[in-house]
Amino acid sequence: MHAVTFQAPGEVAVEQVAEPALRAPDDAIVRVDASGICGSDLHIYHGRVPVEQGFTIGHEFVGTVLDASPDVERVSVGDRVLGCFHTACATCAACLRSDYHRCRNGQTFGHGSKLGDLQGAQAELLIVPRANLTLRRVPEGMSDEAALFAGDVMGTGYHAVAHAGMRAGDTVAVLGLGPVGLCAVQAALAGGAVEVFAIDSVGARLEMAASFGATPVHLTEEEPKKVVRAATGGRGVDVVVDAVGDPAPLAMAISLCRDAGTVSGIGAYAGKGEVPLGLAWLKGLQLRLGLANVIAHVDRVLALIEAGKLDPAPLVTHHMKLDDAAEAYEIYDNREALKIVLTP
Ligand SMILES: [Zn+2]
Ligand SMILES: [Zn+2]
């Protein structure tokens, strides 16, 4: 079968690889009908996340169950399914607290041996461990490309807002309008935010956020702090989502947040950096950080997409063939696409 494999920094290839086979009593084999290219794949593409040469990448998928081990009960052969981007064991201490994203036995699709040694979804076939927890049936009538978002990008945007404890009637600011930030904008509005300030420096992304109902604020041509203060009686917003993941946006998030508000950092921070901790302390802020717990949210996210309250479709800018993955990665790396969907 064909699969997209990591070769070297800046280079992926479509290669012939061995077909997967059932191993554990709760595995499923899925024929991948659509897979996504994601910002996390770029970390691999650039060699920032180490993955072995020849390892199949990709972690967002929709497909059809071709085969299942005897303990797989929640989906059946022939079902259209979507996957979460990682698996969880359901029995470790973290899973028993429903913190599936911190599962000590979890495996992430397509991230090499360091993150569970699980081959990726940018392939014709995929083995899915812990299929009872990892897979969901695609609701009737939902497109592949919409369902694709539930187990990763939309689940992550939803998490950013839910993890902040946002309530109906709150005001929200979202920093960084990549796919996750745009999904966080939708999730905040779906959750009853009265005003969402969407902050970025790319005009097309600001326009898209505005089309969802957010108030667009240009990062450099306007002064986000002034705009947000003026609109909130000088207080700042109840919740700020940092969907970038660097010290500078985190510092801005702290400055935009009201006293005793919440900053939710969903972007991937790395290493050390300077943030105004004194200001965060003085304001009595809550900081909520970390990877999204998509397994905990995926059913609610699917329900919201099915009800039309979340709509990832506008984020899909490119449809390409799996065999053209090398070109697709170049396009994505050049920031010419928001979301590329690959089909066999
Ligand atoms: Zn992803
Ligand atoms: Zn676990």
Image (cartoon, grey):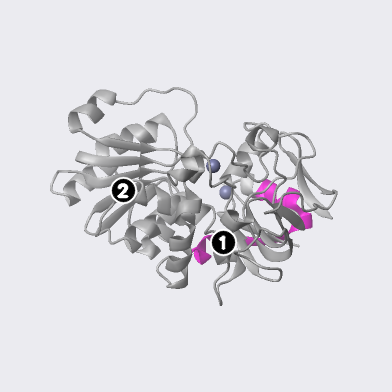
Q: Position of residue 270 (x, y in %)?
A: 49, 29
Residue under pointer 2: 173
Label 2 beta carbon within 8 A of ligand 1: no
Task: State whether residue 99 appears in this view.
Answer: no
Q: Earlier in the sequence, mark 2 or mark 1?
A: 2
Horizontal relation, residue 328 to residue 98: left or right: right
Residue under pointer 1: 316
**Residue 316 among those drawn in magenta:** yes
Disc ID at residue 208: none
Horizontal relation, residue 104 to residue 52: left or right: left
Q: Position of residue 198 (x, y in %)?
A: 35, 51
Question: Between residues 139 and 145, which one lies in front from this camera angle?
Answer: 139
Q: Which amino acid type is marked by label 2?
A: Ala
Distance of label 2 from label 1 (alpha carbons): 23 Å
Identity of the residue drawn at 26% across and 57% down: 195
Task: State whether residue 196 appears in this view.
Answer: yes
Identity of the residue drawn at 47% across and 39% down: 94
Identity of the residue drawn at 35% across and 63% down: 190
Is the magenta region chiefly helix, strand or loop?
A: helix
Neighbour tally class for label 1: few under 14, some 14-19, many 20 plus, Cα within 10 Å: some
Is mark 2 in CB contact (under 8 Å) with mark 1? no
Q: Secondary structure at mark 1?
A: strand
Quadrant containing the C terminus in the rendered view = bottom right
Quadrant containing the N terminus in the rendered view = bottom right
Q: Position of residue 104 (x, y in %)?
A: 55, 36
Quarter holding residue 43: top right
Above or below — where is 29 with respect to 224?
Answer: below
Which residues are the magenta region?
312-331
Furthest residue in direction left, as rendered: 233
Question: Between residues 211 and 52, which one lies in front from this camera angle?
Answer: 52
Furthest residue in direction bottom, as rendered: 141
